[in-house]
Image (tube, helix red, strand yellow):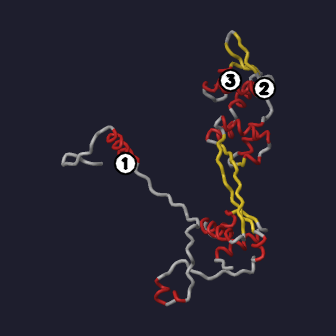
Amino acid sequence: MELRENDVKVLRTLWDAGGTTSVEEIALKTGLADAAVARASLTLSEQGLVKEQTTKTTEVFCTEEGHDYLANGLPERRVATVVHNAGGKLSVNEAVQQAGLPLDFVSIVTGWIARKGWGKIEKTSSGAVLVIPKNPPKDEDEEVLERIGQVSVPIEELPNNLKQAADRLLKRNILASKERIQRKLQITPQGVTVTPPLAPIDEVGNLTSEMLLSGDWKRVRLRAYNVSSPVPTLNPGKYHPYLRFLRMVKRKLVALGFREAVGPLVETA
């Protein structure tokens, strides 16, 4: 069985890690690029020495609004604290203003206070009054917000009650989510039998001018090129926004029946 240097590095790293570890950890310990680890894992998988495990998770993290609420408290908490400190009763508009919130938050705050059972709205001749008899304890929304904090947390790792709280905060745009795919490699029984005594084959990937001049090209072994191997992602350039706009206008004008003209009085952008 012939393995390249990078293939053996990956196998030995898996062996040292107990048989299973993530692709990121392999790249970190071997010093190989992600694309090199991916190529090695593909080769090892084709030879039945390792198998790949893929896990998809949904990570939640605070939005800009969420960071503000993490530092200053949720709107309903800030208003509830103001009302409680004022004796348990306060005009709705006054409570929202004293909490440092715009009046646009009146319906949001009163809705969540009522939904969470923290208080109620009483109609009086002078207007709506918010009644909160006691300072509410910390609820699940606040707990999950503190738990996430400045980092991202897989929602699958949260308890069921906090998962529901995270869903509420996602709908309120206090949290955002992103999917993350974690890839792990695991040594197969066949891979265990060849690790770690197997030595890599000395190969070169590029034929250099020094090899041609010295004659080393006759003694080295050139690495075979695998067209199915992963390669680094290339991000091509983009059109300038104004040029993109001009191209769009041109397409629309041509679609309307206009024709391009060429002459000394016509300039192209």
Instruction: Name the quadrant containing residue 24.
Output: bottom right
Residue 104 lies, in percent from the top left, at 60, 25
Q: Is residue 16 above or below residue 174?
A: below
Tell me which residue sits at (74%, 26%) in the image: 115
- Sooner in the amino-acid sequence: mark 1 or mark 2: 2
Pointer 3: what residue? 95
What residue sits right under mark 2 in the picture? Answer: 117
Nearer to me, 87 or 225? 225
Q: Looking at this rendering, what residue extends furthest in the left direction?
A: 264
Quadrant into which the N terminus falls = bottom right
Mark 2 residue type? Gly
- Who comes first in sequence, dot 1 or dot 3? 3
- Give the residue at mark 1: 243
Front tag of 1 and 3:
1
* Three-letter code, disc 1: Leu
Q: Which x, y percent locates residue 207?
A: 50, 81
113 relative to 255, above or below: above
- At label 2, counting other C-alpha atoms closer than 10 Å, the crowd grade (few under 14, some 14-19, many 20 or more) is few
How packed mark 1 is, by other alpha carbons closer than 10 Å (few <14, some 14-19, many 20 or more), is few
Q: Secondary structure at mark 2?
A: loop
Between the C-alphas of marks 1 and 2, the distance is 56 Å
Q: CA distance from mark 2 to mark 3?
A: 17 Å
Residue 195: x and y, percent? 75, 76
What residue sits 61% from the left and 24% below the top? Answer: 103
Residue drawn at 69 percent across, 64 percent down: 25
What is the three-letter code of the residue carrying label 3? Ala
Tell me whether the residue at label 1 lies in contact with that at label 2, contact meaning CB atoms closer than 8 angstroms. no
Residue sitting at 63 percent across and 27 percent down?
Answer: 105
193 vs 153: above or below: below
